[in-house]
Image (spheres, rainbow, N blue to C red):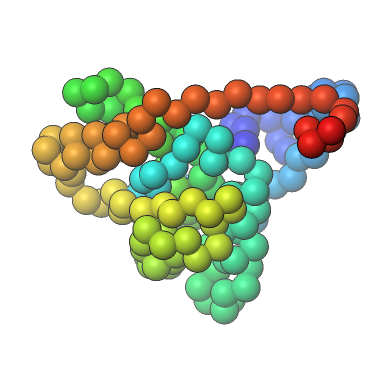
Amino acid sequence: MAIESSLPFEALEIALSGWLQKNYYQMSLSDCQTAELVTIGVLLHSSFTLNRNELNSSVKGIISTLPESKRFDVSIRKDNWFCSAGAIDMLFVAVDRPNTHSGIDFFNTMYDGNNKKVPNGHKLWFIPTYQIEITDETREKIGQEQRSWRGDEMACYVQGFKDLST
């Protein structure tokens, strides 16, 4: 999760410390504090439950193994893709501005419809959108593909202390 604030980091951390501790969260600065993040594309064939810590951790772990010159900061967030069908939930990918080309190359290679290390076996497709003029027709096709792929998927969450297999 990303938080935008006009407070300096230390002041924000102090202001949120009670809530963070109560809810077992921690807060840290992004690796890229010298550059803004820019959206470079979307991930097709993503489910309601895919944008979780596992996906972000997996992606960041893979990026950390790249040569230093190819590493970049990344954020994956759920947002709406708008087309004639309305707002469709999709995963948007943002990277630090100086590394947009490295990010696009990475996501084009990693998410080409084959699962190369995505949690839970998901086969994602990366569609670059950075500095690309997307026609209304293409926007419709992307939105309809995500909508038809997900179909009638429903998500529910179960929580408790006992193992679900008991």
Pinpoint residue 161: horizontal percent, then vertical percent: 87, 28
Q: Nearer the viewer, residue 56 or 73?
A: 56
Pinpoint residue 2: horizontal percent, then vertical percent: 60, 37
Marker count (numbered): 0
Please tell me in which quadrant of the rendered image residue 50 appears: top right
Residue 2 is left or right of residue 76, and the answer is: right
Residue plotted at (78% across, 33% down)? 164
Q: Residue furthest top?
A: 86
Pinpoint residue 33: horizontal percent, then vertical percent: 61, 51
Residue 136 is left or right of residue 51, and the answer is: left
Could one spot residue 11 in this view of the protein? Answer: no
Looking at the rendering, in which quadrant would you find the N terminus?
top right
Could one spot residue 148 in this view of the protein? Answer: yes
Q: Residue furthest front?
A: 166
Residue 142 is left or right of residue 50, and the answer is: left
Please tell me in which quadrant of the rendered image residue 68 appears: bottom right
Looking at the rendering, in which quadrant would you find the C terminus?
top right
Residue plotted at (24% across, 22% down)? 85
Residue plotted at (60% across, 23% down)? 156
Residue 6 is left or right of residue 20, and the answer is: left
Q: Nearer the viewer, residue 146 or 63?
A: 146
Residue plotted at (42% across, 52% down)? 124
Vertical placement of residue 151 versus 39, above or below: above
Vertical placement of residue 138 versus 80, above or below: below
Pinpoint residue 131: horizontal percent, then vertical percent: 25, 51
Vertical placement of residue 90 versus 54, above or below: above
